[in-house]
Amino acid sequence: MNKRILIVGGVAGGASAAARIRRLDEKAEIIMFEKGPHVSFSNCSLPYHLSGIVEDSDSLVLMNPETFKQRYKIEARVHSEVIQINRKRKTITVKDLLSDKTYEEPYDKLILSPGATPIRPKAIQGIEKPHVFTVRNVLDIEHLNNYIKQKQVKDIAVVGGGFIGVEVAENLRLANYNVTLIEFANQIMTPFDYDMAQILHKEMADNGVHLIVNDGLAKIGEDFVETHSGKKFAAQAVVLAIGVRPETSLAEEAGLEIGETGAIKVDSNYVTSDPDIYAVGDAVEVYHRILHKPTRLALAGPAQKQARAAANHIYGIPNRNLGVIGSSSIHLFNLNAASTGINARTAEASGFHFDSVYVMPSDKVGLMPDSNVMHFKLVYEKPTGRILGAQAIGKGNVDKRIDVIAAMITMNGTLEDLRDLELTYSPMLGTARDVVHHAALVALNQLNGVYREVKVSQVRELVEKNAYIIDARERREYEAGHLKNAVNIPLSEFRNRLDEIPKDRPVYIHCRSGQRSYNMVMALQHLGYTNVYNISGSYLGICLYEYFNDLAGDREKIVTEYNFN
Ligand SMILES: Cc1cc2nc3c(=O)[nH]c(=O)nc-3n(C[C@H](O)[C@H](O)[C@H](O)COP(=O)(O)OP(=O)(O)OC[C@H]3O[C@@H](n4cnc5c(N)ncnc54)[C@H](O)[C@@H]3O)c2cc1C
């Protein structure tokens, strides 16, 4: 008998599952139910309609029900909300949202891919106002875009500094709106550590986004928002992007098991607690292979993989489920940023014995056009050297570097594996010793106790304590901006100035990017100095780390002038 497979949700997970099933079974009856008017749209491209990068919102819809029918013999029913699963009868109850009529459809197998809903906390005063928007689908983005254009809105508050909030803020800014981004935590983009996030903060500020961190939205007025701290910002429109909640109501009402993270619990083949019902995508709980615990991961790649795996399992094709590591990337004005695995904050909170390095090599040979610094942070386990995660920010191909690390993590790679990895090289594309090799070498030095370093986050305290800090850059670089109490002893001069460098107290050394200071640290160690530290991140990292917090102007600067070149 032909299988009858019903799918709830017609976008990333749902449409992928439907297409895979058709490839596995030409005879199956496949019906996809979608409560919205569109199936198969590019959720990830939605924010780009606000700037006009995606000019026509119709182009966000990749396939329509007719194409599904003609090409794949898949029935896609839009405006059709599944309101109940009747497990005993193996049927679902569907509400046709246009006619308001309900009907039942029987299934052999049911796949749930209902996604996640944007959170709208009732406690926020004014949350129900018509100028408060969320972004999940094509209608949402059209609605927002039409509203701000028709009402000639000038000021917009975006609430939440995750992927969606940041992308929405960027695209609104590109369209010349005055944008205030409000984030409750002390940083945006939590896959990044605080030190790396400062680079993103600066990029937001440099491009005219008014970024507020450490403050939450308390109240929405007609043309303003007010934060917990009582600050008011002009806003004739508000976009809420403070997170998503997995759509579990159908599953819960049907008595399917919900996991400890609040998402639908599935086994390694995405089967729920009912053997005839599968669930995939943002609505499910997945296994974190580094943290060894259930987690939620609302990303498109995993949703598509899970959909394929569920379809395979229906047809007896075995899957290998390695769990997730959480790889993601974002473009922000002139920067690209990507991360994979866990960051130092999570490693700390999860009790790992770990360390990290922050390096900033060139992404291409310096002589080449478009050669730029790439900020790269590598987190590894001690003493094994197992790679736990990485973050990269720069103008170049950060995603290439992070994808290499993602592959390494997946293969349980160590710092030695990364150091020995044979990668491609051509001057226009990279350097003979790639950014990732550079990070592995620095981390191995650190792990093997070749030299010691302090983190960029510790520098303020060192300056305040009047620690002995050597700036190993050339004089003209020092004169263009330096740490307030740093002594300028360039690498090219220090061998003649050893009498100035004390042996009875710690000596901290930085240059611009860490290369010259590393050489000086090594030389001093060979000359009998035992208390020498390289300052990770060096002057460039220090400037980036301090800049955004200094913008407020309510604390003493530790540098005379910022220098970002
Ligand atoms: C603005 C935005 C930008 C994003 N950017 C990225 C990115 O750059 N990279 C990345 O990896 N991920 C990104 N994502 C996340 C990614 O889109 C999701 O992880 C992915 O779409 C999840 O797939 P899904 O099938 O679980 O849910 P969705 O793709 O959201 O599909 C679920 C569908 O189910 C429908 N539905 C729900 N309940 C019912 C019901 N009872 N009956 C019928 N239909 C129902 C919903 O209407 C919805 O259309 C972004 C998401 C958004 C919103």
Image (spheres, helix red, strand yellow):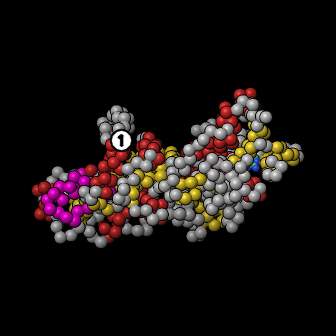
**Left or right: where 341 falls relative to 361:** right
210 to 105, vertically: above or below:
below
| Residue 342, x across and y down, in percent | 47, 55
Q: Residue at x 36, y 56 (%)?
A: 384
| Residue 64, x across and y down, in percent | 72, 34
Amino acid type of the residue tagged 1 in the rendering: Leu
**Left or right: where 111 falls relative to 398:** right
Q: Quadrant of the N terminus?
A: top right
Residue 215 lies within the magenta run: no
Q: Residue at x 53, y 48 (%)?
A: 322
Q: Is residue 36 visible?
A: no
Alpha-carbon neighbours of circle 1 within 10 Å: few (<14), some, or many (≥20)?
Answer: some
Give the quadrant of residue 445.
bottom left
Closest to the observer: 55 or 431? 431
Q: Residue at x 56, y 47 (%)?
A: 321
Spot the residue most to the bottom: 465
Q: Which residue is mark 1?
A: 421
Q: Which residues are magenta?
A: 516-540
Spot the residue most to the top: 70
| Residue 461, x across and y down, in percent | 34, 69
Closest to the observer: 271 or 524? 271
16 to 133, vertically: above or below:
above
Give the quadrant of residue 159.
bottom right
Q: How many marks?
A: 1
**Left or right: where 38 falls relative to 206:** right
Closest to the observer: 284 or 133? 284
Q: Residue at x 19, y 53 (%)?
A: 491
SS state under label 1: loop
Give the quadrant of residue 7.
top right
Q: Is residue 450 visible?
A: yes
Residue 533 lies within the magenta run: yes
| Residue 60, x across and y down, in percent | 65, 38
